[in-house]
């Protein structure tokens, strides 16, 4: 018997979406009311909270995920510790909305991407894709007593996909247009682009990771502020520097990801500390100041987006809508607009959406589709052989 069926048919559900992104800055929790599903979906945001990780905890999580220290015991503990933090964030968003936890119908939790290797080799030398999201969802199930959907990416990988990006399916449901070809750029730790041609069918949508979003900028700022700041607030530091063509050219030549054709996805494994070490070393060798290096890294993020739009887009784009925390970096936004002089660039806010809650909303929506047994992936985003129902359902 399918015990989620009555819930799947409920006309209006109160759902929580939970996300910890590649910036590793904390947990985003959103409470939404969801009516309908598929192209009939209606989502109303009721409350949103972002609970930052404590500095020491964040540093340990990053160290552990780089595999430099820690072992099986700590990995096991981290899964449950994150699970508890997800419970606290979910409770906090209920409090913010003045909704009791017993009123929640459904939770969709992305967890935290601990490691993601879409193109690896297994022990026997065969190609394999693997990914691991932490944040034990059973703790949410126990705390809220409602169905919880989690661990979305693995099912897509099992179907031959890269397990990312997943938000584009929800962008298709919420942002498609009958009159325009819409492109959506997310500026999180990683940048990712979705192109939705006008009147598109799901299989006509293209989405992929463009390269670094804020990840390289954040790490540089962290270093130059001796750990006091973790991002370039409003882009003020980058704006003080001068973009170095030589450093940008060097980044381009040493990137190895940007020029590859989609489907493709990337993460901290490529643009994390080892990459930043090289960028910083090269910047110093070129005689650049910290501000110049931050400015050049910021420009590079914008360059990757404009390169991706001009090289990989199958159809002309009518407008670009940007979301994710990077919209608050006005230097980055200005550079992006300058690189795309003929394209209208706006933000999610201009369309009445919240940039910061978008990914958390997406995982509530993906959970809502999963409990109805509806495929919730796009093959043009992940490269899977067929669309699948992602998410493990805890009843
Ligand atoms: N006021 C601000 N000024 C400049 N940058 C900001 C500001 N606020 C947030 N950011 C940037 O946004 C980042 C967080 O963005 P977001 O929460 O969208 O990333 P994420 O969800 O962790 O990443 P991903 O989408 O790759 O998983 C911060 O690390 C910072 O770089
Ligand atoms: C493996 C992983 O966590 N990938 C993230 C990352 O951060 C942004 C980009 O790379 C995107 O592909 C994905 O996240 C969003 C939520 C997604 O799946 O759409």
Image (tube, rainbow, N blue to C red):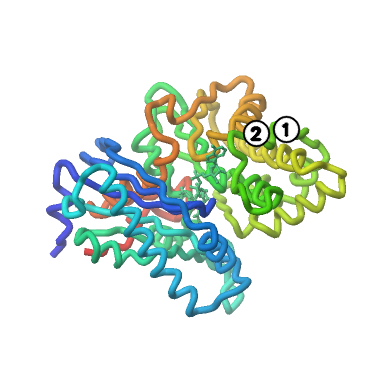
Q: Residue at coordinates 40% horizontally, 33% vertically from top-left?
A: 200
Q: Which residue is mark 2?
A: 236
**To which quarter of the image does residue 305 belong?**
top right
**Callout 1 touching callout 2 (CB < 8 Å):** yes
**Residue 325 or residue 194, whichever sits in front:** 325
Q: Position of residue 92 (x, y in %)?
A: 31, 50
Q: Residues within 10 Å of mark 2 (few under 14, many from 20)?
A: some
**Left or right position of 224 against 179:** right
**To which quarter of the image does residue 68 belong?**
bottom right
Q: Position of residue 230 (x, y in %)?
A: 59, 48
Q: Residues within 10 Å of mark 1 (few under 14, many from 20)?
A: some
**Residue 186 or residue 160, whichever sits in front:** 186
**To which quarter of the image does residue 39 belong?**
top left
Q: Which residue is mark 1?
A: 240
Decide: is 42 above or below 5: above
Decide: is 322 above or below 14: above
Q: Position of residue 16 (x, y in %)?
A: 29, 49
For residue 106, which numbered disc appears in the image? none
The secondary element bearing badge 2 is classed as helix
């Amino acid at each position: 018997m399918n015990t989620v069926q009555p819930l799947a048919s409920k006309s209006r559900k109160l759902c929580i979406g939970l996300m910890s992104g590649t910036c590793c800055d904390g947990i985003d929790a959103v409470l939404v009311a969801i009516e309908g599903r598929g192209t009939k979906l209606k989502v109303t945001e009721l409350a949103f909270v972002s609970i930052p990780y404590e500095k020491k905890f964040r540093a340990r999580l990053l160290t552990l995920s780089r595999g430099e220290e820690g072992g099986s015991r700590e990995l096991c503990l981290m899964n449950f510790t994150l699970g508890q933090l997800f419970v606290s964030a979910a409770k906090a968003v209920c409090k913010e909305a003045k909704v009791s936890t017993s009123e929640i119908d459904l939770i969709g939790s992305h967890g935290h991407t601990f490691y993601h290797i879409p193109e690896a080799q297994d022990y026997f030398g065969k190609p394999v894709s693997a990914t691991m999201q932490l944040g034990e969802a059973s703790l949410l199930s126990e705390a809220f007593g409602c169905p919880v959907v989690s661990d979305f990416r693995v099912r897509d990988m099992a179907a031959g996909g890269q397990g990312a990006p997943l938000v584009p399916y929800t962008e298709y449901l919420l942002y498609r247009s009958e009159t325009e070809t819409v492109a959506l750029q997310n500026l999180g730790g990683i940048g990712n682009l979705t192109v939705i041609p006008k009147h598109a069918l799901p299989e006509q949508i293209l989405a992929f990771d463009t390269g670094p979003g804020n990840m390289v900028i954040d790490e540089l700022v962290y270093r130059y502020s001796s750990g006091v700041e973790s991002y370039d607030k409003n882009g003020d530091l980058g704006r003080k520097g001068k973009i170095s063509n030589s450093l940008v050219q060097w980044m381009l030549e040493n990137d190895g990801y940007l020029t590859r054709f989609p489907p493709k996805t990337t993460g901290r494994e490529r643009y994390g500390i080892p990459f930043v070490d090289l960028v910083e070393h090269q910047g110093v060798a070129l005689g650049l100041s910290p501000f110049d290096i931050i400015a050049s890294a910021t420009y590079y993020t914008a360059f990757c987006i404009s390169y991706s739009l001009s090289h990989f887009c199958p159809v002309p784009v009518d407008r670009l809508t940007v979301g994710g925390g990077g919209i608050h970096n006005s230097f980055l936004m200005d550079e992006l607009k300058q690189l795309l002089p003929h394209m209208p660039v706006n933000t999610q806010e201009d369309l009445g959406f919240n940039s910061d809650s978008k990914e958390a909303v997406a995982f509530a929506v993906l959970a809502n589709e999963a409990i109805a047994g509806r495929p919730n992936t796009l093959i043009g985003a992940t490269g899977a052989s067929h669309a699948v129902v992602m998410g493990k359902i805890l009843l």
